[in-house]
């Protein structure tokens, strides 16, 4: 564990907690966190996760815009549910992306866990896009992805990051509960 990992983990907890509370400051704080984690993952040869963090940086900006400028009269998005077809389509995109990235990482890099890392990256991107759009299902996908991330980070000796993702899992459960109760979803 490094001081950098501790600082990034702290920012991660703050960012995800603010997301649950639908506070748009989750996005700039998350931006700093993902930039720090891109370096951390590079150092431990989790290249798909490193690339994921770089893409997250762009998605942090997108999310910030979605939550503060999109929607009716630029007041930001409301929480919505995806229909079954949209969920299936998002998961299919995550699977295809996972296979493509996994193949590339296995063939062209010395990645530590190319297939698992790529799968977590592919599905994390889907969850992040859903989160930026305030789709309720983002939390269910985050719960699954975060549990698997915990195991990967324990395997790689990133114990603080594993603990962070365990906490992310608990926060995602809370996010699911709070967003499900959001007045925008009520009939």
Image: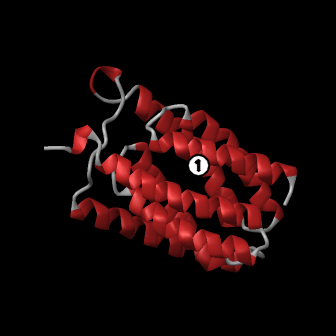
Q: Residue furthest right?
A: 2
Above or below, 159 against 177 in this view is below
For residue 162, say whether it is visible: yes
Q: Residue furthest left?
A: 187
Residue 44 lies, in percent from the top left, at: 81, 67
Image quadrant containing the C terminus = top left
72 sits to left or right of 64: left
Residue shown at 76%/67% (left/top)?
159
Q: How many marks?
A: 1
Above or below, 94 against 65 in this view is below
Residue nearest the observer in this picture, 180 or 62 = 180
Residue shown at 60%/77% (left/top)?
116
Residue shown at 60%/34% (left/top)?
28
170 sits to left or right of 46: left
Quarter assignment of residue 117: bottom right
For residue 104, say whether it is visible: no
- Secondary structure at numbered mark 1: helix
Residue shown at 46%/44% (left/top)?
20
Which residue does the numbered mark 1 point to in the structure image? 56
Image quadrant containing the N terminus = bottom right
Residue 184 lies, in percent from the top left, at: 24, 38
| 10 Å crowding of disc 1: few (<14), some (14-19), many (20+) | many
């Amino acid at each position: 564990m490094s001081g950098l990992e501790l600082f990034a983990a702290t920012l991660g907890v703050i960012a995800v907690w603010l997301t649950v509370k639908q506070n748009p400051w989750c996005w700039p704080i998350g931006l700093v966190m993902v930039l720090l984690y891109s370096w951390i993952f590079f150092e431990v040869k989790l290249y798909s996760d490193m690339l994921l963090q770089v893409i997250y940086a762009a998605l942090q900006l997108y999310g910030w815009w979605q939550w503060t400028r999109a929607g009716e009269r630029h007041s930001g998005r409301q929480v919505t549910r995806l229909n079954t077809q949209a969920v299936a389509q998002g998961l299919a995109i995550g699977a295809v992306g996972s296979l493509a990235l996994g193949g590339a990482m296995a063939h062209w890099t010395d990645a530590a866990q190319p297939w698992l890392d790529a799968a977590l990256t592919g599905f994390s991107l889907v969850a992040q896009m859903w989160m930026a759009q305030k789709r309720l299902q983002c939390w269910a996908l985050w719960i699954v992805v975060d549990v698997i991330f915990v195991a990967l980070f324990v395997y790689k000796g990133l114990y603080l990051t594993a603990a962070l993702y365990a906490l992310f899992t608990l926060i995602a459960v809370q996010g699911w509960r709070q967003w499900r109760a959001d007045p925008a979803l009520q009939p």
